[in-house]
Image (spheres, grey):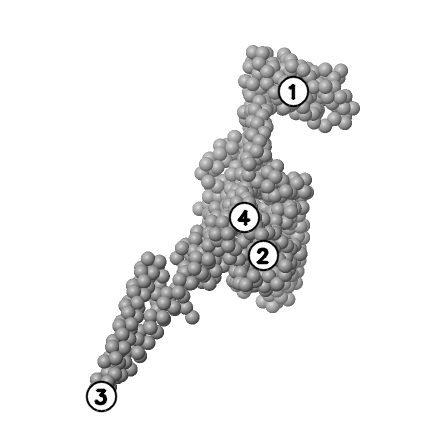
Amino acid sequence: MGKAVNRVKSIFENDSPHFIFIIGFGTLFTFALVIVGLLNGITTLLPHLFYIPIVLAAYRYPREGMLLSVLVGSLYLLLVTTIMGPVPDLVINAYGRSVVIVAVGVIVSVLSLKLSSEKEKYLGLLNDQNDLVAMIGRQGTFSFVNAAYCRYFDADPGDIIGMSYHEQYPPEETALLDVFFRSLNPSRPSGIIELRARGADGRVRMFQWDVSGHFGEKGETVSYLCSGRDITSLREMEEALRSSEEKFRALFSHARDGILVNELREDLSFGPFFEMNRYTLDLFGYERDEMASMTPYDLVVESPPALLTWLDQVQEGTARSFREEVVCQRRDGSLFPADVTAVAFELHGRRVILSILRDISPRKEAQEKIVRSEELYRTLFENTGTVMLVVDEEGIIRNANNEVEKTFGYPKEALLTGEMVIDDITVPGGHYGIVNAFTAQEGTGGGGSGELRLMDASGMYRDTCYTIARIPETRQLILSIADQTGTRQSSILLATVNEINQAVVYERDSKVLIDRVCKEFAALDKYYVIAVSTLDGGLLKSGNVSAPAYEDVHASYLGSACGAYRATRSGLVEYDEWPSADGDERPLQVINFPMTADEEIIGAISVYIRPRVSITDPEIDTLQALANDIGFAIRSRRLEEEKIEALAQIERNIEQLSIINDHIRNPLQVIVGYAVLDDWEHTDKVVRQAEEIDRIINHLDQGCLESSKIREYLIRHSGIDSGKKIQ
């Protein structure tokens, strides 16, 4: 029933096709009744029915209502004169009613226009409000809502008007409204209530509703005018403020720093503490009421000298925060270092000092440990006996120990200019950057070690092994370098000597032996080059060279009055200098070793030391011993070759003697045959001479046989290969 009534009210209060239909139908229906009445002689009662559509039209549509009243009045007058005829009394009455009909339409239209204007002003005022405005009737249904209310719920006024607030709000909120509405009465007609409402966007917001109740003469409720203000942000701010206060209180109470607040009097003296946190009480061992009667001077052994200056600045208004390290005293008399920061500010009209105190005993202990650790690190760094460098990720040398100067000759001051990088002391082309190498190894999980060729301060090349590692939590790397030049050079020389010794024992040809020696020495080419020269008729023959690029150098060297000739004449090691084959400005150092065998000098070994390379005394001794071994081997090979030549000559002699014996026997047999056949008087003599010759030949054959036995003996006991032929 209520909804039907509301629907009827809605029809009459809003522009609706039903309302227009009612006006039109009422007008036509009234005309029909008036026409029927006039035809039946009734002229007084029925025309008054025109007031109904006229008033409705003038109320809802004022301007159209005026026209309708004029049209209805004119048509009515025309009907009366047409149907009833020109009867004076009826015409006069018809004129009067027409005027009244028009007057009623005009008056109602004017009043409606004025009312609409006031209503529009009132509704415009309400719709312009950002607050939500609603009128709720005594039955709990909405009779009016403003634009802000409709926007929040994304609904048209027609959808909300006539709806109960129980349908608009959740049960817990409507229960509060029910209680609140019942609490309003003529003696307490207004009040404020806070409710939550979910908008069209799904967000729940908090509204503060200012409700004014309208009551009838008997105190019954007529309606409630409700104005709602969105206080969500306010409540959120209040909640944030409350949360902030709670957090501040929690931080203040549970801070791991001592926090104290005391008053600063006009005479710059300290008042007692009126606020302190729990940590301060635990740190000093006092109770709150005990510390409430103490001042900052009671907590420190000695006040900082700068405190009075800071207090004067506070008095002048130029002070900033005060920070100092002080020694504090606990209740039990124990002392501890503390870092104190103090600020002065106004609080409720009085000047106060906020002091934040931090126990720095752990930090002091950590600093002492760091100092001891740094001293230990410095001691190890400087006295490790190994070259140590600290470089950053760009390779710039940041630190170096004293061993760098001892090993490579670089003064520490020259390395630590901030401009020298590790690649500056690396042999050009020998490495693509040790820091880049380590970065690549580090990225792939590789180890930070390897081999590197460096150049010392004198320009000499050094073969080194390095280990590199990152210093934790820094961008710097520590580099440990071990000089392996002598060890590597000596190890390669030792391996070469072992191979050459094997060749000396097993190689039978002296020329092949010399070739083998030079090939083995090629392993030492980056340090020095070996050339073997043998004496032939007082001249040194240019033999093989371990580095082909030095063949012309050695040939030109032997063409001069070089140290190689001096070595063959003196039997001693001779030193020389000769231009480099690599285009280096530095000359080659040449060491000449005589090859001696049983005081016979076979030739010389020339050692060309490359620029920027050194040679040690043990290596010189090794090379001299090796030169003598090679000389002895060459001399042995020559003696063996002479034995082979002698044996070959014996074999040739035996062969020639056998051939001659055969050549003698054949003619001798022919001679004996002819002598016997002819029975010559001298046959006996010829036969006897032939037998003598045969005996001599047999004796020669016996000598050949003995020579063959001697040859076999030489082959068996001298190790001479009879298969070798000397050309």
Picture quarter containing residue 42?
A: bottom right
Residue highlighted by disc 1: 326
For the residues labelled 1 and 3, say whether their Cβ atoms are less than 8 Å apart: no
Q: Looking at the picture, how far across and down is residue 590, in whole percent?
A: 60, 54
Q: Earlier in the sequence, mark 2 or mark 3?
A: 2
Residue highlighted by disc 3: 678
The three-letter code of the residue at mark 3 reads Asp
Badge 3: few (under 14), some or many (20 or more) residues near its Cα, within 10 Å?
few
For the residues labelled 2 and 4, say whether their Cβ atoms are less than 8 Å apart: no
Q: Looking at the picture, how far across and down is residue 451, in whole percent?
A: 52, 49
The three-letter code of the residue at mark 4 reads Ile
Viewer-nearest of discs 4 and 3: 3
Q: Earlier in the sequence, mark 1 or mark 3?
A: 1
Q: Looking at the picture, how far across and down is residue 643, in whole percent?
A: 40, 62
The three-letter code of the residue at mark 1 reads Val
What is the residue that sits farthest to the front in this orientation?
681
Viewer-nearest of discs 2 and 3: 3
Q: Looking at the picture, how far across and down is residue 409, in whole percent?
A: 63, 42
Residue highlighted by disc 2: 564
Q: Which mark is residue 271?
A: none
Per the model, the C-alpha gap separating discs 1 and 4 is: 71 Å
From this view, report whether residue 87 is shown above or below residue 598.
below
Badge 2: few (under 14), some or many (20 or more) residues near its Cα, within 10 Å?
many
Per the model, the C-alpha gap separating discs 2 and 4 is: 15 Å
Q: Is residue 634 visible?
A: yes
From this view, report whether residue 213 is shown above or below residue 168.
above
Per the model, the C-alpha gap separating discs 1 and 3 is: 155 Å
Quarter the C terminus occupies: bottom left
Residue highlighted by disc 4: 620
Viewer-nearest of discs 1 and 4: 4
